Image (cartoon, rainbow, N blue to C red):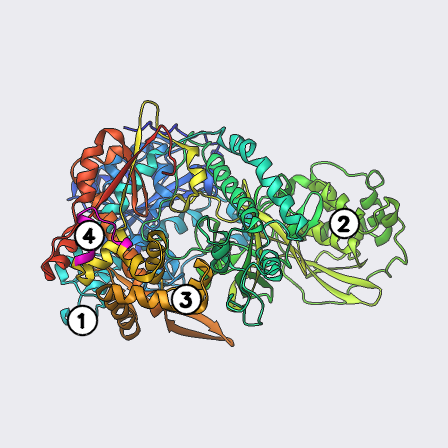
Amino acid sequence: MSVEPAVPTVNLPRVNAAQFQLFDYSVFAFLVTDDDAMARWIDHLCSAAPGTVAADIETRGLDANKFSITCVSVAFQLGADTVALLLDPLRRSHHRKLLARVFDHAARLVFHGASFDIAPLYAHRLMTREHIRKLGDTLVASRMVDTNAKAGRALEDLATVFQLLDDSRITMDKVFDARGLKKADGWWSTDIDTPTYAMGAMSDTVATLRLWGEPGVHGHGIMAHAARYLTTAQAGFGGKGRLNSADAEQLVEDIQRVNAIVLERSARGYAVDTEFPQRYREQTEATAIAAAHTLKQAGIRAGNGRDLVNVLAARGEIDATIWPRTDTGQLKSDKEALKHITDEDSVLHSELATAHRIVANSEKVRGYVDKVVANAPPTGRLHPEIKILGASATGRMCLPTDQRLLTRRGIIGADDIREGDHTLDHLGQWVKVRAVHRYTEAPIDRHTLSDGTQLSSTPEHRWLLHPPRGSLVLAPMDAAGAHHGVQLRPDTTAPAALAHHVNPAACPACDHAYRFGEVISVEGRAESLLRRAGFTPILAAVGAAAVPCVDPHPTAAWLYAAGEPEAAPLLEVLSFDLTHCYAFLCGITSHVGPDDHDVPVRVPGGAFLDAVKLAAYRLGISIGVTADQESWMVRMSTPSPATRTSTESIARDDVWCVTTTSGTFTAWGAHGPYLTGNSASKPEIQQFPSEARGVILADPGAQWISADWKSIEPVVLATASGDRGFLADMRAGKDPYEPVGVMAGIDRKMAKRKMLADMYSQGHKAAALQFGWTLERAKEVASAIRNSLPILYALIDALKKQSEYTGSVTTLSGRVVDQRFRFWENGQMMQDIAKRIAPNHFCQGSALDVMHYSILELDRRGLSDHVHLWMHDEIVADAEIQQELIEVMSTPPPFLEAVAQQYGMEAFLAVDVNPLGSRWQYV
């Protein structure tokens, strides 16, 4: 049994929810916050037969802040009535008791994206392990349909598709506008004492309840839709799979059970070695510095794959005639190209390639272990958000290198960013850069917003999105629905800027700004800036009236006084608190009218203009800049919510990103500073680097083991194809790859790697690069291996054809894996079928089926308390259950037995076990 997490300490403002009970016709449900009415509804619920209850939490933020729960909403059906209640269990003990009654009585507890909610609820003792076992997740169910889609699974999107809510409902945007608040300020400062906040939270839970619907092929909602999707066409439900109705329903339910088992374990959390990051740095820093020096001497920037490839090509260490190239003819340096020379088992033994791998891996490992330690403080343990069936959309979360990072040192290019730099986060606070990530040849998308702003990033890069209801989220732009606002400025505590008087003469930049502006009325000027920063209610705009501006100052002597004319004004504004930012902008503002639409300012260009942009950004003020001969016109206005209107793929380029403790940072583009999201701030357990694993510990007294299946994907392929010889060799303890290597004229290790590469549809050029062959030799080896394994390769070819004809492949358990993908070309959405990777999807998907079966079987045997981690083909568990674990993992699931029996064979799985000791490690 693992140690329980500590109860988080939170500091929530003491507020009272507006007391009401009403019937909201836009969601067609009773929405209730009145204490007496909620108690009566819960009495009615508990007197009825147990049924489905939907639940959701609202929090003060993401990552560590998600443990500050502002409310828990629940929704359920009583006869013809739908009822939603809002509870405040962290601030009101009687609400905690009411919530416990609801959770105890429910037959099913349904969330949308439960991996976010469960750990905070469990840590605060609002949910028990028994409650988690009742879990249902509409997001997990949605991932079983159209599996290749990267977007469309947000609750708002699914509510629209399934027509669950009325579009006329009250939105948070309207609430914030009425209160004179910017959207970002609204989310941060609004709590359950705002009735519409409470109504929005309850409406989302009603949507979750209806989205869950009635499971089964004859039911309704997302569970029913997922089951029908897996059925055969002959079943009459429009399915794309091969299962009958009963089996489809069971498979959908099994995935929900796997999700509950995994989230129960992650809710308890994992012990963390907080000293591991420092030890890792001490052990690897000298090697990493030496490797970086080796690269520098060769003219290669650390972490820059393009430099590496070009230098190796110039030296003749790689064959440029077969090296993959971009559309413009340049040598590729993306992840797929670089692995030919930087993988540990690469046949190219290059000092430069080795140095590049050392530097890149060092940065990657430091990023992971820092994430683990940064996420542990609330409970003293790590609670990873393990997402069942949620790993299909992975990639680099980065910006192109023409974007820079705002730091306390100034505006820094990607190659000059250092760990330990400080940047501004979404709260306007200075946060430390914990890791720097640089990659080459990544795809770039251009996003256009409703206000005309254009942003460039990799498709997977995360932005700060405001859904119509709910809290700020970090997500790729593809996840932005039609009503999601994109936050590009900090959510500052700006009213504090007026707490004390600023003497402009004591601040060189402010003093110059006041002299430069030559403003007549300080009060009028202050009113304009107050309104821009959202300090007072927004008055009705009066249009673009003519506004008098003073002539630009002919020279700005103070710009040169510090000896760094290009950097001095920007660096000074970087050192300001918000009060001085306000005073600085106040000094250059020339308009005195109280009802202006925006505030025009004439300033000299260069660093002074950047200083103005920065001061406005820190106060959350929107600005636009136009050139006007020797000066610039800056128009400051209240930010209006901008939504994504389009996304198009534009190019491939070198990219970068940073990891900060808060999950956000400030980038600087052609138009100035903007806010964006980290590379993922939560550690992705399924993608953990081997060197980073030691940061996660077994609980005191426990000893862990690692069990993994031997060659699980080739075994799946051999079983599904009916290759008796391959399986017989494995069962007899023979090496199935050795005879393949003999026939191909290569060693056993190369034969295994080449066969696995063929499952991923490796081309001849890629094989030549990976194995150091000529193109002709690569073709000969491929042909020899294909001829030696005709049965296996017949299935590989058949899977590609199936994908081409149907747009999908089906795993051995019956899950349908979509092969269709969508992309932008010449401004139009296009669709194609990824038939080349169909064998990969089939083998990996079927291997995942085997993993899911083992998770369920271990749980059926009562062993889940002793199982801790699940990684691809590996399960980490307590050493005391070693024999049971081997028995379960080596027993072929029924679906594997069934396909083997079709060929008159006996299915076979082999398992390796290695001791780990008291911490996770790679073996």
Residue range of the region highlighted in magenta in the rendering: 725-738
Q: Which numbered disc covers residue 233?
A: 1
Label 3: how many Cα within 10 Å (few below 14, some 14–19, many 20+): some
Q: Give percent across and percent down for residue 377.
A: 47, 31
Element at label 4: helix
The residue at which mark 3 appears reads as 777
Q: Nearer the viewer, residue 489 or 335?
A: 335
Q: Amino acid type of disc 2?
A: Cys
Q: Examine the residues drawn in magenta and state their main secondary structure.
A: helix
Can residue 763 be seen in the rendering of this structure?
Answer: no
Image quadrant holding the N terminus, namely top left
Position of residue 294 relative to residue 788, above or below, is above
- Gap in angstroms between the C-alphas marked 4 and 1: 38 Å
Q: Earlier in the sequence, mark 3 or mark 4?
A: 4
- Gap in angstroms between the C-alphas marked 3 and 4: 28 Å
CB of mark 3 within 8 Å of CB of mark 1? Answer: no
Q: Nearer the viewer, residue 71 or 388?
A: 388
Q: Amino acid type of disc 3?
A: Arg
